[in-house]
Image (cartoon, rainbow, N blue to C red):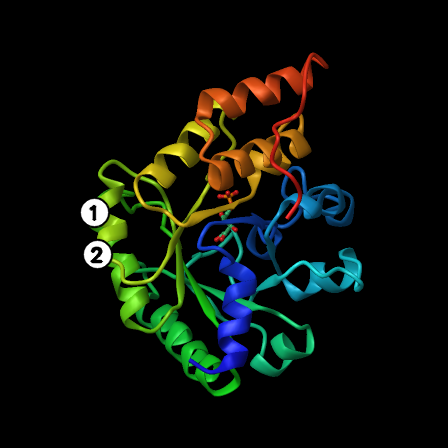
Amino acid sequence: MDWGKQNRLARVMGTGKTVMLAVDHGYFQGPTTGLENPGKTIAPLLPYADSVMLTRGVLRTSVDAASEKPVVLRVSGGASILKELSDEGVTTSIEEALRLNASAVAVSIFVGGDHEKESLMNLAKLVDEGERYGMPVLAVTAVGREMNRDARYLALACRIAAEMGAQVVKTYHCEDFRRVVDSCPVPVVIAGGKKTPERDALELAAKAMADGASGVDMGRNIFQSADPVGMIRAVRSVVHEGASAAEAFSALEGRTKGQGPAPSSSPG
Ligand code: 5RP
């Protein structure tokens, strides 16, 4: 791997464990709860994220250009929640990703979806361009409404993403998640999914880490929390310090009640 690509990947994956803050939801669902004013949401969370995943529109309008936080640029889209979600194309060129100083680009694949082939070709195209310009590619194994999130399906989708050349894969946690990780030759990070109670989201992160995940690419369970900063710090303590969900939750609760220290995890 060329130095530039290695350097970008190291900025995103760091020590091999990562807390990626996902705030790209608006690209298909518009003003998502908690992201109505993206700049206001992102700024206080950024110090605690290892990288931030977002579109160029939100990056340019809502993130300070002096920020040194590695950017994972969402470059697929073209569908909305009103239509078939798998009908995506590549929305942002590799030159634009370089201009924006992205450390990686992110593209969704819809294995089993109506537009499976197009989404896999989007990934293939980005991997080719990424190889040419030294840009790592993160593949998001998006699931359609009708698809199971079981280990058999997710292992299939993650493995295909890695075989196509993605350097990092983002997927969902599931029963028997170890099987998904073990059959995927590149690092796997998990999405948080829909907002759940904080304790449950921390359990999810802890289970994923115990099952071999390389971290989280989490959005709603952080920015829709009543205490987003406390929550991202709690997630950090699980990912980077091996805190149990109970430990992280108790630190979060202590902070909420003003009774004790925040989770000890410090900004990245
Ligand atoms: C959409 C995405 C989102 O970034 C993803 O859903 C992560 O966020 P959350 O933790 O809210 O699920 O990639 O395809």
Q: Percent position (x, y) of residue 229?
A: 68, 34
Q: Is mark 2 within 8 Å of ligand 1?
A: no
CB of mark 2 within 8 Å of CB of mark 1? yes
Name the one closer to the observer, 224 or 133.
133
* Residue at 21%, 56% in the rendered image: 183
Figure check: 249 above or below 165: above
* Left or right relative to 111: residue 95: right
Q: Is residue 175 left or right of residue 220?
A: left
Which quarter of the figure has residue 11?
Answer: bottom right
Residue 86: x and y in percent read 40, 60
Instruction: Provide the secondary structure element on which disc 2 rests.
Output: loop
Q: Let me know if residue 162 appears in the view.
A: yes
> What crowding class fits label 2: few (fewer than 14 Cα within 10 Å), some (14-19), or many (20 or more)?
few
Q: Is residue 61 above or below residue 48?
A: below
Residue located 25% across and 50% down the image? 180
Q: Amino acid at mark 2?
A: Ser
Q: Residue furthest bottom?
A: 132
Q: Which residue is mark 1?
A: 179
Work out how far the residue at label 2 is from the one at label 1, CA to CA, in angstroms.
6 Å
Residue at 66% over, 25% down: 262
- Where residue 114 sits: x, y (%)? 32, 62
Q: Toward the viewer: 12 or 143?
A: 12
Q: Position of residue 36 (x, y in %)?
A: 72, 43
| Residue highlighted by disc 2 | 183
Q: Is residue 206 above or below residue 110?
A: above
The residue depicted at 41 percent of the width and 28 percent of the height is: 203
